[in-house]
Image: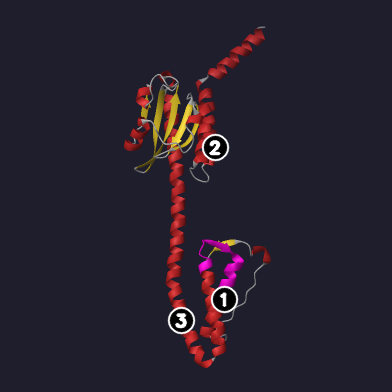
Amino acid sequence: GVVFTLSIVVVIRLIMDPDSVRARQSDSMLKLASQTLTCMNDGMDYKAAQKICGLLLPSTAAIAVAITDKKQILGYAGFEEAQNLPGSIIRTHATHATLADGKLRILFTPEDIGFPSESSNIKAAIIVPLKIGKSIVGTLKFYYPSASRITETQVSIAEGFAQLIATQIAAMELEEQKKLATSMELKALQSQINPHFLFNTINTMASLTRTDPDKARILLREFATFYRGALENASDLIPLAREVEQTVRYLSLEQARFGEDRLRVDVDISDEVKALMVPAF
């Protein structure tokens, strides 16, 4: 009995040790942060927001967690979930106020949130803006059954995860901007090259109509096929086999211009890579 009692005391002391408690809390928060980021691999949409709300809810004292953009609910988990489906319009004036001024709000009454006091079990809330630079792109909200549930820890969790989510949204937007910039650079290059190629090929065909009409007709058909393919391949990515076919046709027109004695083309493409998707042109 003495050994059992001493064992219980040791276990209780280990559990109540502040450093031990903080270490477990930190480990739990880090794992939760990692899971949250994983949910946003493809951006912040309804599916990602709903998953994040479901992850955050058990790790807080809240009875509901919500994520919104500037107009609607993206995700909602917890109390009255069926009445707050993704895509629903934002209703509470406190959320609209946070979207307007970008200030964190800690609300201790239903009236402050925007609920009638007698109609909801939600009595308090933390609303944190999702900021990207100076822009407000949404909110992260924690709802509580009483004001006493809101502690410094709860506020820190809300602020920390709001910052994490906003940072990830910004990173995704930056990636999209980089892709857009690359696409625009490619289109700019195409617009510079195509006019020169067009005029030079037309001049070549015009000269061949006098010296070699049959070859001029063949080139005209190849030229029409090439430009039809260029229009069909307007998407960003096409199969490598189609791109090689276009490249060979392009070079055949250049051969007619410069002469086959000055330009020789050899093509050797493995079958296993022909289906790979590559940028057009």
Q: Is residue 236 magenta?
A: yes
Earlier sequence position, callout 2 versus callout 1: 2
Residue placed farthest to the top in the image?
A: 1
Earlier sequence position, callout 1 versus callout 3: 3
Earlier sequence position, callout 3 versus callout 2: 2
Q: How crowded is mark 3: few (under 14 residues within 10 Å), some or many (20 or more)?
A: some
Query: What amino acid type is highlighted by mark number 1?
Result: Arg
In what element is the residue under mark 2?
A: helix
Residue corresponding to mark 1: 249
Q: Where, by quadrant of the figure, is residue 126 drawn?
A: top left
Instruction: Calculate the distance from the C-alpha at mark 1 to the C-alpha at mark 3.
Output: 15 Å
Residue corresponding to mark 3: 200
Query: What amino acid type is highlighted by mark number 3?
Result: Asn
Instruction: Calculate the distance from the C-alpha at mark 2 to the C-alpha at mark 1.
Output: 50 Å
- The label shown at residue 35 is 2
- Can residue 93 be seen by looking at this rendering? yes
Residue placed farthest to the left in the image?
A: 101
Q: How crowded is mark 1: few (under 14 residues within 10 Å), some or many (20 or more)?
A: some
What residue is rendered at 36% in x and 29% in y? 105
Q: Where, by quadrant of the figure, is residue 272 drawn?
A: bottom right
**Are circles 1 and 3 on residues that touch, CB within 8 Å?**
no
Query: What amino acid type is highlighted by mark number 2?
Result: Gln
